[in-house]
Amino acid sequence: MAKPAFKDAPLRREIEDLAKQQDHHTLACWAAECAERVLHVFEAQQSEDLRALDAIAAGRGWIRGEIAMVDARKAAFAAHAAARESDNPAASAASRAAGHAAATAHVKEHAVHAATYAVKAIFYDCPIEDQERRVLEERTWQYQNLLGGNTDHGERTS
């Protein structure tokens, strides 16, 4: 069965515009939170594969100044490799969200990609009749979280 074509919420552009106004640290925190919200999607399919979890941890480690950017970037590459190896589109998107969250340490613009892949993970993980609502709910959370600057500065939230 072919996967349905991803349909994003209109808030995508507002999120992209808002992200351009944020500093690197804020975006790294936000990207980690976005990816962490869908990590369970990857873990449900690839329970033994820690690369997505490790990427989020690396991004948070960079935020706290505990690891170098190059180490966070290596973790990002590993999460993207895990995404390529997965045959489940939801799990793959969740791992890509984690990869982009870690890659935000290198380039802050990766944060918006982490958010988009998180939404894709939700889209592919839920029933077709719930996709539009769930995508809008997640994009609304992303926007409100970034707008309010409610980032946890490196601590795991779940």
Image: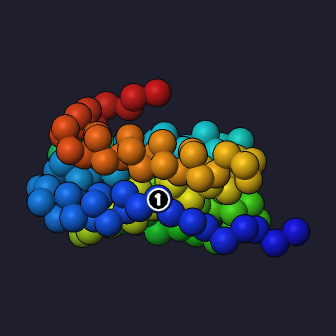
Q: Quadrant of residue 145?
A: top left
Is 99 located above or below residue 43 in the figure?
below
Please tell me which residue lies in front, 38 or 146. 146
Percent x, y of residue 102: 36, 57
Residue at position x 17%, y 65% in the image:
20
Q: Residues within 10 Å of mark 1 (few under 14, many from 20)?
A: some
Question: In which quadrant is the N terminus drawn?
Answer: bottom right
Viewed as shown, does residue 58 lie left or right of 147?
right
Query: What x and y, as percent, mark residue 40?
Result: 61, 39
Provide residue 32's location: percent of width, then percent of height: 36, 47
Tell me where residue 123 appears, x and y as whole percent.
62, 55
**Residue located 72% across and 68% down the image:** 4
Closer to us: 52 or 26: 26
Q: At x 50% / y 53%, what residue is drawn?
A: 118
Q: As drawn, which residue projects farthest toward the top?
A: 158
| Closer to us: 125 or 84 | 125
- Determine whether 112 is above or below 39 in the image: below
Under mark 1, the amino acid is Ala
Dot 1: element: loop
Tell whether 141 sits left or right of 147: right
**Is residue 104 in sight in this rendering?**
no
Question: Which residue is the extreme one toward the right?
Answer: 1
In this image, 108 relative to 47: left or right? Answer: left
Mark 1 highlights which residue? 9
For the question of whether residue 113 can be seen, the reply is yes
Front-most of 44 and 17? 17
Image quarter of residue 140: top left
